[in-house]
Image: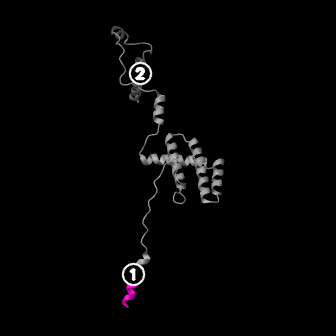
Amino acid sequence: MKTYGWIILVVLITATVSLHGQDAAPPSVDLYEEEKEAEPTPPPRPPNGPELPEISQLDQTFKQPRSLGPQADELRLHKEWRQLKNRTVNDAKVQAAKAFAQAARTDLEKRNRLRDYYNIYYERMSALATTPEIKLALQALKSSHQGLLAQPRVRPTPDTSTPSPTPSATPAPKKLADKHKKKKEKHHKRF
C-alpha cells in the first residue's frame, strides 16, 4: 500500500511542476521584434492575377439565364407563355372580345372579330412579358393564329397594292363518261 501512496505522490508533484513551468507569454510580447527591425521592408508587390469583379457584378452575371440547349429553351419559353396566358385569360377586355367573337353570325364576321380578339389578347400578354425572347415568341404565335383566319380560297379579296398577273386557264380534266361509253359499245358489239 505504501508503494501506491508513493506513486500517487510522485505523479501529483510532477503534474504540479509541469503546470507552473509552462506559463504562456502575454500576447503583447513580440519575440521576433529584433529580427523585424533588422530586415528592410520589401516594396509592395503587384497583385497576383487579374482584378476580381465586384460581388454585384458577379450576381448579375449568374442571374442571366444560361442556355441548356434548344429543347430546354423551348420548354422555358413555353412555361413563360403558359404563365402569361393564365394571367391574361381572366382579363375583362380579353373575355369580352372572345365572347363578342363567338357571338358572330357569319363565318366572315367571326374571322374579323377573332382578329380583333387576338390583337387584344396578345397585346395584354406582350405588356406583361419581361424578356425580349418571349415577346418575339408571342409575336410569332399571334401571326400564326391570325394566319389561320385567312382563307384565301373561300373568298379571295384582290390585293390592289401590287398588280398580279391574270391566271391562265387550266385544261379541263378528261371526262370518265367517254371511256365508259367506249367500253359499252365494245361490249355490245360482241353480242
Residue 16 is situated, as x and y percent measured from the top left of the image, at 43, 21
Between 149 and 75, the one nearer to me in the picture: 149
Residue denoted by label 2: 13
**Residue drawn 44% across and 60% down?**
168
Residue 188 is situated, as x and y percent measured from the top left of the image, at 40, 88
Please say if the residues under marks 2 and 1 sit with CB atoms less than 8 Å apart.
Answer: no
Query: Which of the 4 image quarters holds residue 103?
Result: bottom right
Q: Is residue 88 magenta?
A: no
Q: Is residue 188 magenta?
A: yes
Q: Crowding at label 1, few (<14), some or many (≥20) Cα neighbours within 10 Å?
A: few
Between 72 and 56, the one nearer to me in the picture: 72
Q: Main secondary structure of the magenta part?
A: helix
Q: Crowding at label 2, few (<14), some or many (≥20) Cα neighbours within 10 Å?
A: few
User: Disc 1 residue type?
Assistant: Lys
Residue 80 is situated, as x and y percent measured from the top left of the image, at 53, 46
Q: Secondary structure at mark 1?
A: helix
Q: Which quadrant is the C terminus positioned in? A: bottom left
Q: Which quadrant is the N terminus positioned in? A: top left
Query: Which of the 4 image quarters holds residue 68?
Result: top left
Q: CA distance from mark 2 to mark 1?
A: 138 Å
**Residue drawn 42% across and 15% down?**
25
Q: Secondary structure at mark 2?
A: helix
2 vs 1, front mark:
1
Reading the chain from its start, which is encountered first: label 2 or label 1? 2
User: Disc 2 residue type?
Assistant: Ile
Residue denoted by label 1: 182
The magenta stretch is: 184-191
Q: How many marks?
A: 2
Q: Is residue 25 above or below residue 165?
A: above
**Residue drawn 63% across and 57% down?**
102
Residue 24 is situated, as x and y percent measured from the top left of the image, at 42, 17
